[in-house]
Amino acid sequence: MSAVSFRQVSKSYNTPKGSLRALDGVSFDIEPGEFFGLLGPNGAGKTTLISLLAGLAKASSGQVAVHGHDVQSDYAQARRLLGVVPQELVFDPFFSVRETLVIQSGYFGIRHNGAWIDELLEGLGLADKASANMRQLSGGMKRRVLVAQALVHKPPVIVLDEPTAGVDVELRQTLWQFVSQLNRQGSTVLLTTHYLEEAEALCGRIAMLKQGRVVALDSTAALLSRASASVLCFKTDGELPEAIRTAARITGRMVQLPAARAADVESWLARLRECGVPVEDVEIRKPDLEDVFLQVMEAHA
Amino acid sequence: MSGWQTLFYKEILRFWKVGFQTVAAPIITAILYMMIFGHVLEDHVKVYDSVSYTAFLLPGLVMMSVLQNAFANSSSSLIQSKIMGNLVFLLLTPLSHRAWFVAYVGSSVVRGVAVGAGVMAVTWWFARTPFAYPLWILAFGVLGAALLGALGLIAGLWADKFDQMAAFQNFIIMPMTFLSGVFYSIHSLPPFWQQVSHLNPFLYMIDAFRYGFFGQSDTSPWLSLGLVSLALAAVSALALHLLRTGYKVRH
């Protein structure tokens, strides 16, 4: 049985401008033990899909189930199996870190959860903050508490909605170590993120959403092999000609151009030389998930 | 602890941690009312034959504190959680709508009764009242707190902003409590306003609560019991319905 299943899920919101279709017939399954990535540009429907899974919103049509338990008709069981780390950095200012975790355990009917709470605090680098009030914590620390809160009831399915947005390197590493360990121990993980290198490194399978539809769904390896071209990278301070600019991915000084064959590399470099654009740090690399992502999104434009 | 017990406990902890604001402040307010109105009106207002005005005022002030604080508890907790966004921690749990209801209304009753007992204890210095029927006192204290706790729950779910909540509190709850005979017996009003007062459900709670002290009231306590119970049933049914359908909290 699938850990998570979406069946023909649609969701429309009524807005002053009329009905907005956030999800349109989304169907896919996540198997137990998978590390699954859900990618898409802002507004693609990722958070809506997770809200439906978590019972924070109701689907307009279709079914969502966690280990076979429908999230509407059998919500109590579905929510017991699900640990959700929300995207927004929210907290209850009345309580300390440990109180927050003890109370969250209690909502799931769990008493005497001290040993597991200690393990969570340790694993997420929160041990010395246990008795600090939530208000006193930095943003990164609050994020860690959100992760711990999602895990107090040892859910077999963990959902992380952009957990590393605005988070420093140290926390990212702590977080991924901890979540990867849970995944190795059998937990299913569903991750949404805008950091595609994270998704590439962590996720075995990936779904890409665009405008409420699934536009790609495959193993990470298969998605990467889809990209036809290698990539020519270089840095420059010069002014690029229009023809090159439209074909390139430009990040500040860094320019990346698709190069399917060796001859393409030569022709790009020749054109740059003709235009008198100085280049440095030239390298040719294999395509990454970001290249695939951009190709997929462009193909469905 | 089971889920609802945890939520109940958390809600009590929430107001207890800010006890100066949630318990001590309303007690001080009640003392000020007692001092000012008791002093000014003692010789001018005639209520029941054998009862001094200050003694008459005491149960009314206690009940008013019970009602206002029960309402404030559930409504402010919910609106704060909604605006802070931390209501999501509850929404993600398997807690049923009944568990939410029992916990929010139960903690409101605890706060209402705690503040009421505090007001009672402190104002006891100003006037001694008899305790004719303690069970009526207790019954109406709890029923009134539960009714206002459930109303607060509805208001907390409905309001999107603090502004709307303040409107609910200032334009509905405050006038209804002030015009319910806390400071006067409705028999002192012209006949027309007596009729109007009878449409105010808060009147019956205050009046019957007072009956528990003096053994006399403007309306039969049994009628009040029936009306307040009916109101509680209706408001509870609405609150449970809103919680079950996820009104304004599950889209």
Image: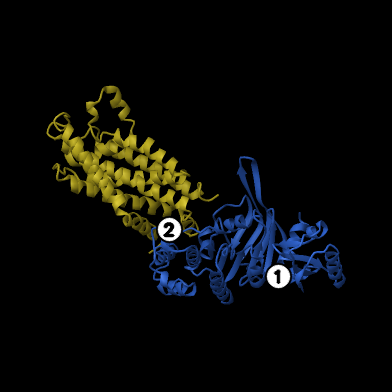
Chain colours: A blue, B yellow
Q: How many marks?
A: 2
Q: Secondary structure at mark 1?
A: helix
Tag 2: residue type? Answer: Asp
**Residue B211 shows up from this direction:** no
Determine the residue located farthest toward the left in the rendered image.
B50
**How many angstroms separate mark 1 from mark 2 (CA)?**
38 Å
Q: Residue at x 35, y 52 (%)?
A: B106
- Dots 1, 2 in contact, CB < 8 A: no
**Residue B85 shows up from this direction:** yes
| Quarter of the view holding residue A291 | bottom right
Relative to B250, say whether A113 is above or below. below
Q: Residue at x 47, y 73 (%)?
A: A125
**Which percent across, then down, holds residue A225?**
77, 71
The residue identified by callout 1 is A220
Q: Residue at x 67, y 70 (%)?
A: A200
Relative to A184, say whether A78 is above or below. above
Tag 1: residue type? Answer: Thr
| Quarter of the view holding residue B195 | top left
Q: Residue at x 33, y 47 (%)?
A: B70
Q: Nearest the camera: B66 or A98?
A: A98
| Quarter of the view holding residue A46 | bottom right
**Which percent across, then down, holds residue A233?**
76, 69
Read off the chain for label 2: A
Q: Secondary structure at mark 2?
A: loop
Q: Residues within 10 Å of mark 1 (few under 14, many from 20)?
A: many
The residue identified by callout 2 is A92
Relative to A238, say whether B183 is above or below. above
Whether residue A26 sits left or right of residue B64 in the image: it is right
Whether labels 1 and 2 share one chain: yes
Read off the chain for label 1: A
